[in-house]
Image (spheres, grey):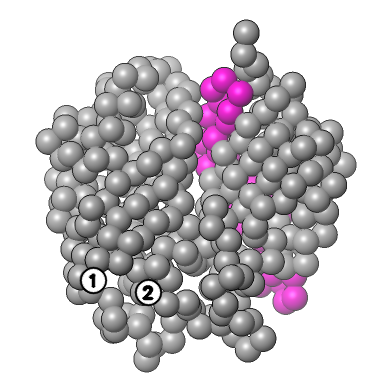
Amino acid sequence: MTEPVPRAVVEDFYKALASCDMHALAPYLDDEVAWAISGPADVLPFCGQRRGKSVVLELLNRDIPLLLEKRRLNPETMVIDGDRAAVIGKLTATRSDIGHAISYRIAQFMRFRDGKAIEYTSIIDSFDAVEQVLGHPLARPAGHPAEKDDFISV
Amino acid sequence: MSYEVPRSVVEAFYAVYAARDVDKIAQYLHDEVKWTISGPVDLLPFCGTHYGKAAVIDLVRRQVPQVLRTFSFVAEAILVQGDQAAMLSRQSSRRTEDGRTMSFRVANFMRFRDDKLVENLSLIDSFDAVEQVLGHPLVPPDGVRGDGGDLVAV
């Protein structure tokens, strides 16, 4: 039987994650935490799967800031049920090298055990994220005009 | 007292949605339902925001199947709290034009009222989805992808 995660644990974990406070986040990561971010890892190097507390902290504290700085998570909805939590919101950041503002939707699913995160899976609007990181629309096949007006921002 | 959606309603809706049983899906849709799928509308025409029961039924019955036909929709997590639900699923579909199989993860965040769905936000790994729908990589080998290009080095 899985133990329900207290709301306070989820909120503290998320607050630390959202504000990139690694000292506050570290106590909430299980040593064997599995961390997955959907998206093309060759374009967005922080995407992919990682395992282990130290690897995840390195990802959040070193790898991602090489591409995105001033990173913040802005939650819109948080759902907590049993040992799991899910959040939908927006990630905002600036591209580290040129300071372009970046903002894209992100859904996060977490599972906790003994007050620590053991699984993290995020789904991002990766097409939108890639275009913003590249700073230009991706090439369309013939007949698909790459007009910015065609995009939705949700 | 605020409305709380019964887990049985969420699970029943999920079952008919996973089966893409449009007539049964319709029974769970509020007349004023708002259904959003994030992604580039010019490449994935079913993306965007659809308002109203008739529009959502048309989306599921006609618009999405013009691009892909889903044959498997498996839940990895279903969370329910208050009037909201969050789901993480693995969707497997066939491209309508040639039957090519494609698979990607989907996050759904839903809100219910009076046991009817009033709001859904679907988030997909849209870069991956677009590549699978197009049937080729989005960024050519001599472009940005894989060779650094105008991406920052990490």
Identify which amino acid the numbered label 2 is placed on: Gly
Q: Return the x and y of residue B41 as percentages of the image width and height.
A: 63, 66
Q: Secondary structure at mark 2?
A: loop
Labelled disc at residue A135: 2
Part of the protein shown in magenta: B71-100
Residue count near mark 2 (Cα–Cα under 10 Å), binned few <14, some 14–19, many ≥20: some
Identify the subunit bearing mark 2: A
Which mark, residue A98?
1
- Whether A22 is drawn above or below B125: the answer is above
Q: Is residue A123 above or below residue B17?
A: below
Marks 1 and 2 share the same chain: yes
Residue B83 is a magenta residue: yes
The extreme bottom residue here reads B142
Q: Answer with left or right where residue A57 lies relative to residue B128.
A: left
> Which of the 4 quarters of the picture holds residue B144?
bottom left
Residue at 56% x, 79% y is A146
Pointer 1: residues within 10 angstroms few (<14), some, or many (20+)? Answer: few
